[in-house]
Image (spheres, rainbow, N blue to C red):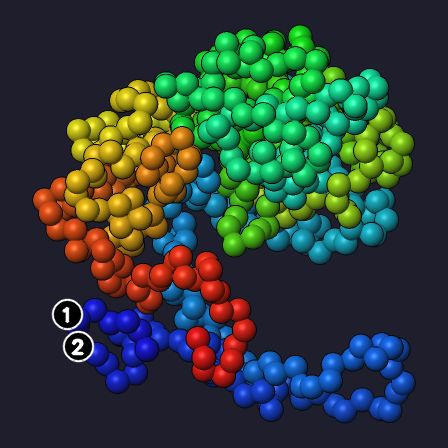
Amino acid sequence: MLDQPKTAPATFTGNRALEMEEPLLFEIGRPETSGVDVEEPEPFEDCLGGLERQRPIGLPGLSEPETLRHYVRLSRMNYSIDAGMYPLGSCTMKHNPRLNEKMARLAGFADIHPLQPQSTVQGALEAMEQLTHWLLTLTNMEALALSPKAGAHGEICGLMAIKSAIAARGETATRKIVLVPQSAHGTNPASAALLGFEVRSVPAGDDGIVHAEDVASAVGPDVAAIMLTNPNTCGLFERDIGRIAKLVREAGGYFYCDGANLNAIAGLARPGDFGVDAMHINLHKTFSTPHGGGGPGAGPVALSARLAPFAPAPVLIRKGEKLELNEDVEYGQGFGRIAAFHGQMGMFVRALAYMLSHGGDGLAQASRDAVLSANYVRAKLRGLMSAPYGDRICMHEVLFDDAWLSGSGVTTLDFAKAMIDEGYHPMTIYFPLVAHGAMLIEPTESESKASLDLFIATLRRLGEKALSGESELFHAAPRYAPRRRLDETLAARKPVLRWEGGAT
């Protein structure tokens, strides 16, 4: 049954009008039945070598109406960008124009197969070529690897190109260090460690940015690369980025820029001008394709002239009027493949449709509007919520901490749960780690002033309640969600991953 608030009378079904209670598939279905008729196979001799299943699979059988209703009802419990504001900092949860979807569903894009002859998919390859042109123009870089499937996959790709370049110079044994700022995304040090590099932390200054002096004291002949996000995860522009790039390059290292926050500068500043050697680009963020729930996504990697020869296969090249995905892993000095096929075609089309419909001036305006939205939120919450690095102009996201809640008995988590009752997905919390009790808000350019005003008024009202001693309101939240607050520590330590016929 739904955990119904004490103020509302219980209903017999557990439903509350259009808010439907929905059991698990195992509670609805019947393992002994199937929603389709499957004929018994003719006698055959299996080739599984004794590995065949020894007991029924135990999956529930449902009719088509039961299946459809189940997932429709679950979908009504989900929050989405189509339902409301999604202020997740460092995620860029913006509106996905339906024009993008229409283009991605065209038969020449949606119905092709990666193994069919390239002569039959020239239109799709041309879309990939145009996408490459746009991304290289926006970044002022030399080459583009299209195949990485997401941001972290792009990080691995960029670092593998760097590792290949170092190997070509005969310095694999000496260049073992990757510099990573304390405020970096967690995938940055993980990607470096996965490839066998040793991670050396670089502190963030009291102003929330990385200082060239700290990088200067960390670089040396053992440094392979630095991984820096700009704008960074505190929502601030790294003003020393040019000097940092010069320091790393002069020491023989490479500059990897995490492209997660490109939405603040797309069309306004080109990472290649900063001295960046490799940068992944989250098409599913900056260029508004759907993301979340594990995919789909796309993380192409832009490479400087120094790293272009080390791009992975396949490489898209033009031969006269024909386009070709060059499959030869010896093309250039790349490390071979990073994915089975050529990337996410649907994501390519959606991103290209977004770019073509906006144009260069429109992309720049979107970036300006994203920055304006974040600074509007910052200014309107001034005097209530505390900023760890002071009330400074931010980029596309604004960072608050929990200092303003001190003594209230309300934590960042409590505040986030109360936002759910008000109909908002919470902002990113407890990240970046350099801010205690962080609350990172990224409104994006999708939100109107009216939408932002209601969001701000809601946070102010909740803040006033927290500071006036109404802490129990927060501790009990969320009251109105289909499920109440979990014991998250217990759930993490003792997860229940198997259906046991009623035991949960």
Front position in the image: 268 or 425:
425
Confirm whether residue 422 shows in the render.
no
Would you name the residue on which mark 1 appears?
7
> The residue under label 2 is which amino acid type?
Pro
| Position of residue 75 measured from the top left corner of the image (x, y, whole percent) | 43, 65
x, y (%) of residue 484?
30, 64
Question: Quarter of the image holding residue 440?
Answer: top left
Q: Do the residues labelled 2 and 1 touch (CB within 8 Å)?
A: no
User: What residue is shown at x 81% (from left), y 30% (from top)?
Assistant: 334
Residue marked by disc 2: 9
Q: Which residue is drawn at 78% across and 34% down?
A: 312
Of residue 141 and residue 467, the one placed in the foreground of this image is 467
| Quadrant placement of the C terminus | bottom left
User: Is 427 left or right of 25, judged from the image as shown?
Assistant: left
Q: Which residue is drawn at 76% across and 91% down?
A: 40
Residue situated in front as seen by the camera: 139 or 109: 139
Side of 290 where 78 appears, left or right: left
Which numbered tag is attached to residue 35? none
Residue 483 in the image, given as x and y percentages of width and height: 33, 66
Task: Tell me which corner region of the image, top left, top right, bottom left or bottom right, holds residue 373.
Answer: top left
Q: What element carries label 2?
A: loop
Q: In this view, does 430 lie above or below 422?
A: above
Residue 56, percent from left and from top: 67, 86
Q: Are there few (<14), some (14-19), or many (20+) residues within 10 Å of tag 1?
A: few
Q: Which residue is drawn at 32% across and 67% down?
A: 482
Looking at the rendered structure, the kind of residue marked 1 is Thr
Vertical position of residue 226 compared to residue 344: above or below: above
